[in-house]
Image (cartoon, rainbow, N blue to C red):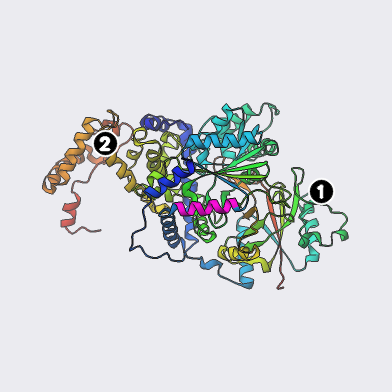
Amino acid sequence: MESTADRFVDNAHRALGNEILQQALGHVRVNFIEKRRQAVEALPEFEALRQAGRDLRDRVLADLDTHLLAFEAKVLEHGGQVHWCADADAARNKILEICREAGARRVTKGKTMIGEEIGINDFLAAHDIEPVETDLGEYIIQLRHEAPSHLVAPAVHVTQKQVEETFRQAHRDLDATRDLSEPRSLLSEARAKLRQKFVTADVGITGANFLVAETGSSVIVTNEGNGDLTQTLPRVHIALASIDKVVPTLDDLTVLLRLLARSATGQEMSVYTTLSTGPRREEDHDGPGAYHVVLLDNGRSKMLGTPKQDLLRCIRCAACLNHCPVYQAVGGHAYGWVYAGPIGAALTPALIGLDHAADLPNASTLCGRCEAVCPMQIPLPDILRHWREEEFNNKTTKPDRAPQPVRRGLRLWAFLARHPRLYRLATGIGRRVLAGRAGRSGRLDKVPLAEGWTVSRDLPAPSRRGFHAQYRKGYRG
Amino acid sequence: MSDRDTVLAAIRANKKALPSDAPAARPAPVPARGRVDGAARRDLFVRMAEAASASVEMLTSPEDVPEAVAAYLAAQNLPARLVLASDPAIANLPWHDHPMIAHRIGAATVQDHAALTVAFAGIAETGTLALLSGAETPTTLNFLPEHALVLITTDDLCGTYEELWSRLRAATDDGAYWPRAVNLVTGPSRSADIEQKLLLGAHGPIKLHILLLDVEA
């Protein structure tokens, strides 16, 4: 997928001014957060499971090659194939090769973020193979020629009215006067349209939430059932997975499953969790005749042993997106590439290079809500800070990165921060000036040298007495 | 060098062993909720399945299954017609006593509106069914029809997933005969992709009706 991550600032400004998008993002703020909270409260072991999940992934990553080889051996034992791919190019070509061998004209797809990462849809279409997204959200955005804006709810930026417009435009063979005013009628129309695609597809491509070494299975977790039709009906099933998805045993898988649905949608379990292992057996009446796992690295092995390794613990639940004030304000497209929100801001620079995504780690207040809700306890704010440091120290990055005034400002702040007396003196003056300017309103709509910041927000005025002064007075409430 | 070698070499070069003072792996917590037996396990399964929008009907004899199926189809205003799994637990039921139910045995097609299959197990912890692919239980029965009916006996209820996996390992000669698909199904299919409004019946069944045969009763 083409990246516009280097244009985050412009993207974000456009998103903030987009009323339809802002209306759609309201659903994220309300629904996901409350549902997750209730599900977590209903499971007393949730915190202990977070620890166990983190330890499990750390253990696997410390010995990743062994677990991947064990997985591969089991896939082969059950009659499947594993294709190792170092980069996006290799994965695209391997998938095309499998499709061509199967004489494929049409491919149905379950939801796969790796598929987005390697831009498989455009690639297949350019080679005369029709890719059809079957997850309702993915189908909507495929018709709209858009990218997903959320890990779990890819069309969360689209309003119901826009879905209706999109369907009317795409399904021209249907009666133009039909009633599409209810979500139910939209869903029924998509279901009927996609049924035709399901039964005529030659190859089904799914992602994989997990790979299980014990059995050689790829695992998908869905609610609609589209992923299962995708991997059951066509002659060939391709599971597309990155190397960080492997877990050793079924019991390990269980730990992550207990965290995933609760963190993602607030469900106890998603509706369908399916383990696929090899092609159909001789006596089976259904299922694909061939089973392929395309195993993608694409920059992940380079993250091992670095401070970025913890990102490989991610199970893509999107809790960090849902709880992030920046994501809630600008939505997913502003991040410019496949992964949005805090995980996107931390992961994108590792996968496409800091040069192409240097704004992303800076687009955060480091409020820490992402880390607090992350089921895998990924220290997202720390990793964002790492990237900022790297950007600051790396003078070879683009000249417009961290321009001189910013660098000078940061140097001045660093100097003050190391000289507490001067720091207190300077902040004391600043505080009094700002508080005086704000007057009774307690808010500043303009701050000298910070107009860029205050143009779209007000700054709460600081209190007249600082923390140190209040602490000395014994105010500890 | 093949991509396989390249990827493995990169992993080996970069991976970092856990610190030597890292605590040994502890067994992961198993939710206390699922560690129950007998009637409590059955009740938990029913409660959790219903919370996930499945319907559960308790039966005391396998002989009652065809009657219950006929009643379900009638209540849903469906023609008395369905496709059945060839598993003996279903195929050997007294269907001939109910000639008004038109049935076919085998895999499902897009024309089928209702199907009856049998679960390998149920997991009380989350009200989930474990359905295995196989000659006698085709996977399409679980996904293609709008109405998925599933038979399960209380003997086959597990409390937790850990219990499911050990039963499955035992049933497959420690994984040697592992089925192509293990479908863990919790309620009927759904989507909230349009403005987060939850709708049942996306691409899979709109209804999941569980016939729970209570062998203890």
Q: Which residue is at 87% across, 54% downward?
A: B100
Left or right, A477 with reference to B86: left
Which residue appears farthest toward the front when viewing the image? Answer: B1
In this rendering, would B36 be left or right of A299? right
Name the secondary structure under disc 1: loop
Decide which of A23, A262 is in the foreground and name it: A262
Number of the label disc, if any, that sits on residue A394: 2
State the extent of the magenta-drawn residues as a range.
A65-76
**Other-residue count near label 2 (Cα within 10 Å), few / some / many at <14 / 14–19 / ≥20:** some
Q: Residue at x 33, y 44 (%)?
A: A384
- Give me the C-alpha separation between circle 2 and circle 1: 71 Å
Residue A382 in the image, given as x and y percentages of width and height? 32, 48
For residue A333, say whether it is visible.
yes
User: Which mark is on residue B79?
Assistant: 1
Label disc, if present, on residue B29 of the rendered structure: none
Q: Tell me if residue A465 is in the magenta stretch.
A: no
Q: Are marks 2 and 1 on the same chain?
A: no
| Marked residue chain, label 2 | A
Mark 2 element type: loop
Residue A434, relative to residue A266: is it above or below? Answer: above
Q: Please count the marks in the image.
A: 2
Residue A69 magenta-highlighted: yes
In screen coordinates, is A347 left or right of A104?
Answer: left
Residue at 18% from the left image edge and 41% from the top image edge = A413
Instruction: Please tell me in which quadrant of the rendered image residue B49 appears.
Output: bottom right
Q: Specify the principal SS of the magenta part.
A: helix
Q: Nearer the viewer, residue A164 or A210?
A: A210
Residue B6, quarter of the rendered image: top left
